[in-house]
Image: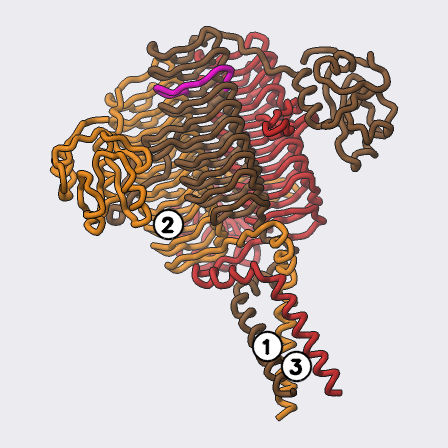
Chain colours: A red, B orange, C brown
Amino acid sequence: MRGPFTLSEIAAQLGGRVAGEADRKVVQVGSLAHATEEQVVFIAHRRYLGELAQTRAGAVVLSPEFETCTTLPRIVTDDPYLYFARLARLLNPVPICEPGVDAAARVHPSASVAASARIEIGATVGRNARIGERSWVGAGSYVGAGAQLGEDCRLYPNAVVYDGCVIGARTVLHAGAVVGADGFGYAKDGERWNAIPQIGRVVLGNDVDVGANTTIDRGTVDDTVIEDGVKLDDQIHVAHNVRIGANTAIAACTGIAGSTVIGRNCEIGGAAMIRGHIRIADGTRISPATAITHSLRAGTYTGIFPFDDHVSWRSNAAVVRQLAKLLDRVRALEKRLLEKESNRD
Amino acid sequence: MRGPFTLSEIAAQLGGRVAGEADRKVVQVGSLAHATEEQVVFIAHRRYLGELAQTRAGAVVLSPEFETCTTLPRIVTDDPYLYFARLARLLNPVPICEPGVDAAARVHPSASVAASARIEIGATVGRNARIGERSWVGAGSYVGAGAQLGEDCRLYPNAVVYDGCVIGARTVLHAGAVVGADGFGYAKDGERWNAIPQIGRVVLGNDVDVGANTTIDRGTVDDTVIEDGVKLDDQIHVAHNVRIGANTAIAACTGIAGSTVIGRNCEIGGAAMIRGHIRIADGTRISPATAITHSLRAGTYTGIFPFDDHVSWRSNAAVVRQLAKLLDRVRALEKRLLEKESNRD
Amino acid sequence: MRGPFTLSEIAAQLGGRVAGEADRKVVQVGSLAHATEEQVVFIAHRRYLGELAQTRAGAVVLSPEFETCTTLPRIVTDDPYLYFARLARLLNPVPICEPGVDAAARVHPSASVAASARIEIGATVGRNARIGERSWVGAGSYVGAGAQLGEDCRLYPNAVVYDGCVIGARTVLHAGAVVGADGFGYAKDGERWNAIPQIGRVVLGNDVDVGANTTIDRGTVDDTVIEDGVKLDDQIHVAHNVRIGANTAIAACTGIAGSTVIGRNCEIGGAAMIRGHIRIADGTRISPATAITHSLRAGTYTGIFPFDDHVSWRSNAAVVRQLAKLLDRVRALEKRLLEKESNRD
């Protein structure tokens, strides 16, 4: 945490217009409910005006429409949420990577590790691997033979990058993320499965975030590719030969099967399941808990089975298994009624 | 494994009434199907009476209603399942933590590690971290700067606790569990995503169990909180700013989105998906594979799409996409029929 | 990568009939889209004939029906996909395990480690554990007390095998896989949960593949068993006391609840959810994203809620909650219409 900063100093760095006491000092961001006088909060929706009236925060970031809703010192900006993101980063800069290789790390003599990089206890940097400037290889993490990390990357503890995978600049792997495990490819050989060697790589672009325990498998022959700016939450699975376009964001627990191509700027909800060998257009939105079974044009798609109290669910769900027959019965009724109506004429 | 114990010795420690040979010695618990004469089994449901008749176990724990169903030495108790849990623990005590810091662990000089604690190979205890009495930090696990572990905790190998997180007494993290990775919070900045620093913590209470590869993200500003006695199975995801009430149990593969509040004493089935910013009342039960999309009062809720053989599914599922039209057609039929009936009068 | 090999040399080792230039040398497998002249591709379906016409590959593996579709040097075989798997393995042999115990590994004096085995940095081999010939215990991985690994196994970095678990020959655990964590078993003790000690083991057969971050819990009393040749993708969860029959393959993100028995030669799609205490017959196929709630005879089963554009979904999903009533309305219509038809006669 840096600071304190006055609101004037903040506006000088981040823009926005100060209203009220411009010398108000803040040291940290806070929430409406729990902020103290030294903290700054934001409000981006009318539904929080009640909480704003109660907050003990020292200052608030808000849009012009709410400017008169409070007498707190404030910064007025058109996009308070984005402003808050920048302000939080100003007050909480990315930690400096203290360079050095821990005595209990294992760096192969042929590996190239930037002098400004940090390799922590128990970490491995394999044969011919490359670690860029200021990159941080956390405790127990693993960078395999021939793998490359760009500048300013961070591998949190116990993240694993298999041999030959390539990671761009400013990319983050949270703890337990696994990049480059073998794709799930087998040919049937009688009753047995014959594994197909997975010789492709995983290529991650710049500014990619990979959540904790997320897995991204290496390609069978060609690569699995995650483009710049993609954000992956925790426990996502990306199968072999998938491509994810730039700036697409995917929430936790989603699974993407092999060879599917997802466009740029998509937003995919948590626990979505996307089948293999399909194409999702740029800008597509997929709701949480939705199974996508064919290619999609841009749009918003949903497929959640509506829950209910258990007893109601049981009686409704029983009808699901008779829907085709139910449709036939309605058709038959329509026909019979039409016949009656015709006869009458 | 301790023992052997006679049934009398067991009843002296755990209660219950011995029937039959009170001096029968047992050394271990067993299953009805595979127990040997030195093992004790339990029966809690009529459907296992057939297996009871066949068992080679040396003794059985059962309720009064089944007391006469066997001539085996037996302990009679009102809750045989709970009794069995206690008996299994008596025969299989929690392993003693042998104190000591492995030479290949990395404990920061400013950290406070109880003399009775154990820190294994490759483990990290960060700056100003605190490890309580008899707590066991397994091989390759990580306790970040300023993080705290209470007494009698156990981190199995490669569990990760990020900086600043707080863990109560007798709490267990299984292998690969990650506590405190960044929550998934970004503000749109043109086409790019601007990460919001996640400065909240994760706070785990006492007697919490966290399953293997489960992830619990740190809060954005306020904390993510897991109260006392919560039991989380493997591969669960808990997003930032979630609160889970005391003694709630959640089965594997469930995902809980951000800022949702789950009450006390809830039971949530596996692979459930719970959306963000909702409230689940105390004592709620949620079935497996159910997507919960709004707040819940206490009750039992289900939302499983019923499976079928593939061909039947295909014909029924096609009708799902016409349900609104089908309802309209039924309404139209009702209207037409009503008109006919009225005309007739 | 070995080689180069001429097509004749390949056919001498793997069978098949060479057509065209038998001396064509190849060094690697490739994809139709990106192969170079030194690479060999395969084609197994008519839909790729267009790509075959465009490919720059040096040779192609194909079935007799496509033999005349190209003038490239080719190997003709009845099962090109299986042939390609074998050829890819020929060109990409499993890496040799260089024996040795890293100075920063921790092998208990009582453990038995084959001289040809490899134990990497930060790895643990516990008391009385056994590591078979040529088995490879990767960086940061863990083999608990009394656990056993057969010959030619590989544990990728940070894989964890808990105490007492048994693993057959040629079995692979990808990074972050956890074998033997406690099953999720508790008895209610008032409001609290009383943990039932999980004293069973996990027993993995020969030639089992376990994907990255997959979890297989130990049994409560008896063992959790995965038979020979089972292939598990990433992020699968297998609960306590499950048994999976030989050569069954399961795609990523699937969850299997406790005590369920899955037969041999099953194929289970990704993100399927299988409830506990049921039996799945040999040879059963389960579609992705399908929740299986009762025992199955052999067949193909599906239960995917069909997605739609969000607006259509909303109107159709609303009717799901009225299905039982809708059925009643249709029945009532049928009855009224029948009455009218009867009256008329």
| Foreground label between 1 and 3 | 1
Secondary structure beneath dot 1 equals helix
Residue under label 2, please give it: B267
Mark number displayed over residue B336: 3
| Residue at screen point 52% across, 59% down | A317
For the N terminus of chain C, the quadrant is top right
Three-letter code for the amino acid on which mark 2 is drawn: Glu
Secondary structure beneath dot 3 equals helix
Mark number displayed over residue C333: 1
Three-letter code for the amino acid on which mark 3 is drawn: Arg
Asked where in the image residue B297 lies, by quadrant, the reply is bottom left
Question: Looking at the image, is C51 positioned above or below residue A271?
Answer: above
Question: Looking at the image, is C94 positioned above or below residue B31?
Answer: above
Q: Nearer the viewer, residue A267 or C169?
A: C169
Ranked by sequence position, the earlier of labels 2 and 3 is 2
Q: Which residues are magenta?
A: C143-154
Residue C24: horizontal and vertical position, in percent?
82, 14
| Residue at screen point 74% across, 13% down | C12
Indicate yes or no whether the magenta region holds residue C43. Answer: no
Residue A27 seen in the figure: no
